[in-house]
Image (spheres, rainbow, N blue to C red):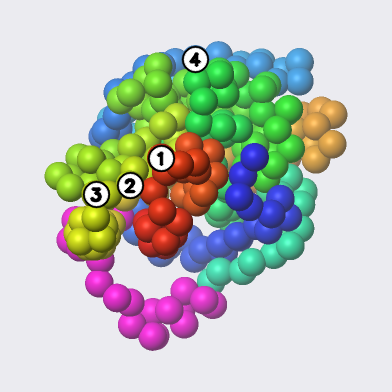
Amino acid sequence: AQAFSETEIARVRCNAFVAKTAMAGADRFPFKLYKQEGDWSLQGSEGKYSFNPETCELDLGEGAVARFYCRPIQQEPLRPSSADAAIRAGASIQIKSSEIMREIQDEEENEGALFVLPSQLNGAEYTSHERRSIVEVVEEYKRDNTGGPRGQLAAHPAAAQFVIDNAANERQQEGINAVDQLLKVEGIKEVLELRNGYLEIKEPKDEELEKQVLALMDENLHSLRPLVMEDIPASGLTPNKGRRATDMQHKVGLVYASAVPVQAYMNKGPKAANRAFQECVAR
């Protein structure tokens, strides 16, 4: 259901000091907390989680504590990166064709790695923008064999359940949402709308308005919130989904990323915005 190859995995190998410094001092949880404490159940295993909105620490149970980051990228508008910065970033990022669950549970190669998962803009994994596709329990991810759900299933299930319980959707309008600040901007909010984690793009009245919307997006991209869960034990389901890998105690990080549907889902049909504009928004 995602516009991603199931085997295309972005694996970010981060220097621990740099990663911790960049994410230090996380603000208080900025969204409405629909569930601070919750239950999870997966493949016959069950437990509870507890979230601290002041520190963004997520007690997963079983002696593990993860941390959820959702701060905006920065306070000032983004500026073009220097060539040197791009070279340094390239040295730290690998694109690997593999199997996501096996990679997450590879302690020798990937302890401490960040895995970028194809998710929605609310951090959850819905097969479509329609209300009937809203997921309520992590067990439902077993039916979706795309890369995002598989990645979440490979890590401790409490993390996935917390995101599911607090993701923005039709039932929880003020939940976790990577674009909440962007969609408050005058001129943008009239054209873009989040529908159950998917970004809907409406047709501007004319070409001049299209240019204005794109300029406003450039000015406000810094307000996007990367949704990141760090220090999660890789003790979710094994790649065949047959059992929990409770013997896996090394930790990884998950980045809940999302593409923008172009001529797909609610962004197709006679009332949809033109393809060129959709592609510009997506880029």
Instruction: State yes or no: residue 1 in magenta.
Output: no
- How packed is label 4: few (under 14 Cα within 10 Å), some, or many (20 or more)? some
Amino acid at pointer 1: Lys
Instruction: Tell me how many marks there are.
Output: 4
First reached walking from the N terminus: tag 4 or tag 1? 4
First reached walking from the N terminus: tag 1 or tag 2? 2
Q: Report how far apart the C-alphas of labels 3 and 1 lie in the structure.
A: 12 Å
- How packed is label 2: few (under 14 Cα within 10 Å), some, or many (20 or more)? many
Start and end of the magenta stretch?
71-91
Contact between labelled residues 4 and 3, with CB atoms less than 8 Å apart:
no
Q: Is residue 5 left or right of residue 17?
A: right
Contact between labelled residues 3 and 2, with CB atoms less than 8 Å apart:
yes
* Image quarter (top left, top right, bottom left or bottom right) of the C terminus: bottom left
Contact between labelled residues 2 and 1, with CB atoms less than 8 Å apart:
yes
x, y (%) of residue 270? 45, 42
Amino acid at pointer 3: Lys
Instruction: State yes or no: residue 88 in magenta.
Output: yes
- Tell me if residue 15 can be seen: yes
Q: Report how far apart the C-alphas of labels 4 and 1 lie in the structure.
A: 40 Å
Q: Which residue is mark 4?
A: 38
Q: Is residue 145 left or right of residue 60?
A: right
- Using the image as rendered, state which of residue 146 and residue 102 is in the foreground: 146
Amino acid at pointer 4: Gly
Q: Secondary structure at mark 3?
A: loop
Above or below 73: residue 239: above
x, y (%) of residue 38? 49, 15
Numbered label attached to residue 271: 1
Above or below 238: residue 205: below
x, y (%) of residue 149? 65, 37
- Tell me if residue 72 can be seen: no
x, y (%) of residue 80? 29, 76
Q: Which residue is mark 3?
A: 205
